Image (tube, coloured by chain):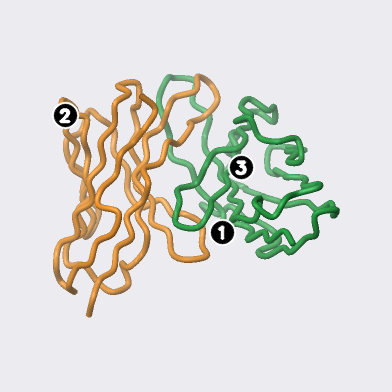
Chain colours: A green, B orange
Amino acid sequence: DTEVTQTPKHLVMGMTNKKSLKCEQHMGHRAMYWYKQKAKKPPELMFVYSYEKLSINESVPSRFSPECPNSSLLNLHLHALQPEDSALYLCASSQVTGALRGTEAFFGQGTRLTVV
Amino acid sequence: QQQVKQSPQSLIVQKGGISIINCAYENTAFDYFPWYQQFPGKGPALLIAIRPDVSEKKEGRFTISFNKSAKQFSLHIMDSQPGDSATYFCAAVGRLYNQGGKLIFGQGTELSVKP
């Protein structure tokens, strides 16, 4: 099973709302990622978690707050977003390698977020 | 040095033809090169991947060719079908010791296969 499940599939929120995106995987991967993708652009890395600890924050504004409650779950808490934050938010997971070798990442279907 | 350059931006191919997408990178620390296929409104799906110690990898109609000295790699889709119409992203994995991999994506190629 190479499935990464994201909920909800679609989300419309106002600029004063608080909402959360959820991601779940059961592949035993210990690295999980949040990416943001605008139309006709490649995904852009936002956060990396390894062993449930935040290892990379790509200078993402504090209105985006990630959380990794356990090895299978990844959340992205949203607060006071702007219309330009509207995008497809993708979760991904991969193995963590002790050796210096890259490994494939598996993506979820994404959450289409619209900020009004 | 962290960039991956992909071309062409868009590609139109007749059914049964060969689709070729090219990518180039600078950072020799990259050691894993996946290709992703993305349909509108969906997440990227891993298609095929290669490591730089291999010059070619084939899976069904999809082949990656890798030229380590030129720091270039390409995706060939043989017998292209209308169902292959999607956006294709090449990527390179920047290694993060003991942390998984940081994907560096190319800009994407929008492939349209005409019946």
**In the figure, is residue B58 to the left or right of A85?**
left
| Residue that carries the numbered disc 2 in the rendered image | B70
The kind of residue on which mark 3 rests is Trp
| Residue that carries the numbered disc 1 in the rendered image | A109
Give residue A67's quadrant in the image. Answer: top right
Q: Residues within 10 Å of mark 3 (few under 14, many from 20)?
A: many
| Residue that carries the numbered disc 3 in the rendered image | A34
The kind of residue on which mark 1 rests is Gln
Q: Chain ID for label 2?
A: B
Q: Residues within 10 Å of mark 1 (few under 14, many from 20)?
A: many
Q: Chain ID for label 3?
A: A
- Element under disc 3: strand
Q: Position of residue A80 (x, y in %)?
A: 81, 47
Q: Nearer the viewer, mark 2 or mark 1?
A: 2
Badge 3 vs badge 2, beta-carbon distance below 8 Å = no
Q: Nearer the viewer, residue B113 or B48?
A: B113
- Element under disc 1: loop
Hey, which residue is sitting farthest bottom in the picture?
A: B115
- Element under disc 2: loop
The residue that appears at 53% across and 21% down in the rendered structure is: B98
Q: Position of residue B18 (x, y in %)?
A: 15, 62
Q: Is residue A73 above or below residue A38?
A: above
**In the figure, is residue A44 to the left or right of A53?**
left
The kind of residue on which mark 2 rests is Ala
The residue that appears at 21% across and 60% down in the rendered structure is: B61
Instruction: State how far apart marks 1 and 3 are (Cα).
Output: 12 Å
Q: Earlier in the sequence, mark 1 or mark 3?
A: 3
Q: Position of residue B85 (x, y in %)?
A: 32, 68
